[in-house]
Amino acid sequence: MLDVPEARTRAGAGQHLRPARLLGPALLVVLLLAFPFIASSFWLTVAVFCAIAASGALSLNLLVGYAGQVSVGHAFFLGVGAYVGAYGGQHGWSFPVIVLAAVGLPALVGLLVGPVALRLRELYLAITTLGLVYVGQWIVVAFDGVTGGVSGTPTTDLDVFGFDLGTSAYALGLPMTRDVRYYFAALALAALIGFAIYNLSRSRPGRAMMAVRDRQVAASVAGVDVTRYKLAAFTVSSGMAGATGLLYGSYLGYLVPESFSLELSITYLAMIIIGGFGSVLGSVLGAVLITALPQVLSYLAEYSTFLATDNRADHVAVLLYGTALVLFLLFEPEGLAGIWRRAARRVTRRGSEQPEGSTR
């Protein structure tokens, strides 16, 4: 048991660290808000795609990392949201109707797919969800009158209650271009989904969901409704993916079947593996790394003959994140989030171990 002076010392150190803990998030918020006005158009575009990818990774991590349901069909749900948004925009639907349809239809499909998770687990479930991607590709081609088929279909910029994301204007003396508007919209969506998942994971339903993930039989014996929580995980995750697809498709401006291929599903799965299963922070870190890496290498190709030859920048990017996948699976199952948490604990521990009276 700690004696009184030592307890007071540690309590004082903890109080001293509270402002430091708030300083980091505050600086991050300031940086995120200022970034679109200080970055070039190239890096702003990269940031928009990173923010959109973060939303998609978060929605997938809810299903895989928190609920333990392996899925390789995430591209299908993003595609449904994107194509519904394109169709609604072309036919003059209002923003609330577009959002309701783009979120509701994927959620409904997720609810229908959910019962499959009750019978299948792990590899078998992954193969089943893989079929959704090919079903989606077939639907796009077969119903070309609605989707545009292999030729694709244009999308319209979202009009969020009178705030058109596709226009450019000045606000408070700052240029609010299309990219800037989509940047803030993507940032808001990622923050909303991340906040929802963070709070869900600390609620009773969230703990029940993770109990199903860890020990399904034990959770059932303890009174957890396994069927209910598996269906809920698929439904909510699919709806979030639909919202991400809506924003993604609108920003792209044009949709083709290849936009939502198996490669996209695997990319999102790689994001949460590298970032860390069951972690909001890990989803964001993995999404940023996987999305930005090819663009960074492409940028460096302008200064490197090696990277510029035969599109080597793209090949190197695939090689790097493929290698990262293997290394994280073998040596760091908790992903980037695990590395971050350990580093934060070391900093906190060093601060709490400062001698009494130290001003450092």
Image: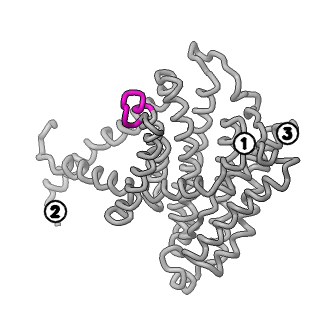
Question: In the rendered structure, which segment of residues is drawn in magenta?
Answer: 299-307
Could you say whether the residue bearing mark 3 is in a helix, strand or loop?
loop
Q: Residue at the spot x=67%, y=41% of the render?
A: 247
Q: Measured from the top left, where is residue 288 in percent x and y?
A: 47, 44
Position of 73 relative to 79 (above/below): below
* Pointer 3 or 2: first along the chain: 2
Q: Which residue is mark 3?
A: 93
Q: Quadrant of residue 120?
A: bottom right
Q: Which residue is mark 2?
A: 2
- On residue 255, which mark appears? 1
Q: Residue at the spot x=62%, y=32% of the render?
A: 182
Few, some or many residues within 10 Å of mark 1 (<14, 14–19, 20+) = many
Position of 71 relative to 308 (above/below): below
Q: Amino acid at mark 2?
A: Leu
Q: Quadrant of residue 127?
A: bottom right
Per the model, the C-alpha gap separating discs 2 and 1 is 63 Å
* Pointer 2 or 1: first along the chain: 2
Few, some or many residues within 10 Å of mark 3 (<14, 14–19, 20+) = few
- Of residues 250 and 144, the one nearer the viewer is 144
Asked if residue 63 lies left or right of residue 88, the reply is left
Q: How is the image coloured?
A: one colour
Q: Nearer the viewer, mark 2 or mark 1?
A: 1
Asked if residue 225 lies left or right of residue 143, the reply is left
